[in-house]
Amino acid sequence: DVKVTQSSRYLVKRTGEKVFLECVQDMDHENMFWYRQDPGLGLRLIYFSYDVKMKEKGDIPEGYSVSREKKERFSLILESASTNQTSMYLCASSSRLARGGGVQFFGPGTRLTVL
Amino acid sequence: AQSVTQLGSHVSVSEGALVLLRCNYSSSVPPYLFWYVQYPNQGLQLLLKYTSAATLVKGINGFEAEFKKSETSFHLTKPSAHMSDAAEYFCAVSPYSGGYQKVTFGIGTKLQVIP
């Protein structure tokens, strides 16, 4: 069974802390994504990566950075957490070979609360 | 540019009644279209996708969607709602072309099934 796993289901951090969210996929996918999900706003793309060490900004990259040192792992970093980054964070992956219609496989999400 | 509009952020149906979740899209090129479902405390999973092979697409759990180019719609239906269908449903669009193409998600529709 294909799988995308995220390091934590729930996380509580304080304002100003550096936060790491980790995502691992076991499908040998080239593409990996980080989204945040907020009520009434749907999913918004933060960053994506189409290869190791490659990254592209999504729609809302401000306040975030990412790291992809290995093909299976994609990390989202909040350099200095703020309360407006309280949200559900979803990681996803897809195969490059699937072209534009590639199905994305999602992890279970990390609900981050910044106090 | 592409966009997705889901009409109705909340929909309630009685158990056994028809489910109809509406999605209209905008795309400058022929699109791939998707419906994803998110059960409580889980990530998104693919329900079905349209890739131009057939306008009526059948998905998992008895759901289907019809692509109507003239109406730029891709509404999701199920003849008879089951309690287990209670979830949030997301329509998504991406351009029909090679390489990585950004997927744009709608804001989601929460389906409530009343016993």
Image (cartoon, rainbow, N blue to C red):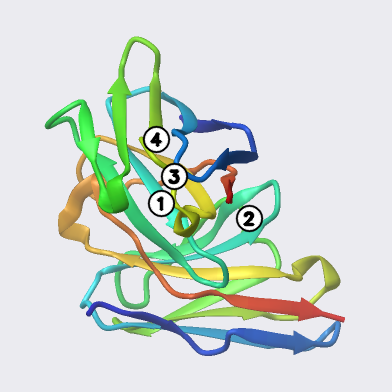
Residue denoted by label 2:
A60
- Number of residues whose C-alpha sits closer than 10 Å to that of mark 3, classed few (under 14), some (14–19) or many (20 or more): many
In this view, the mark in front (1 or 4): 4
Image side of residue A58 versus residue B50, left or right: right
Q: Which of the chains bears the disc numbered 3?
A: B
Amino acid at the residue labelled 3: Ala
Residue found at the very far left of the displayed protein: B53
Q: Which of the chains bears the disc numbered 2?
A: A
Q: Report, in whole angstroms, how far the alpha carbon at label 3 lies from the one at label 2.
A: 36 Å
Residue A111 image position (x, y, % from top left): 66, 76
Which is nearer the eye, B64 or A73? B64
- Per the rendering, the mark at residue B81 is 3
Residue B100 visible? The answer is no
- Number of residues whose C-alpha sits closer than 10 Å to that of mark 2, classed few (under 14), some (14–19) or many (20 or more): few
Residue denoted by label 4:
B76
Amino acid at the residue labelled 2: Ile
Residue denoted by label 1:
B36
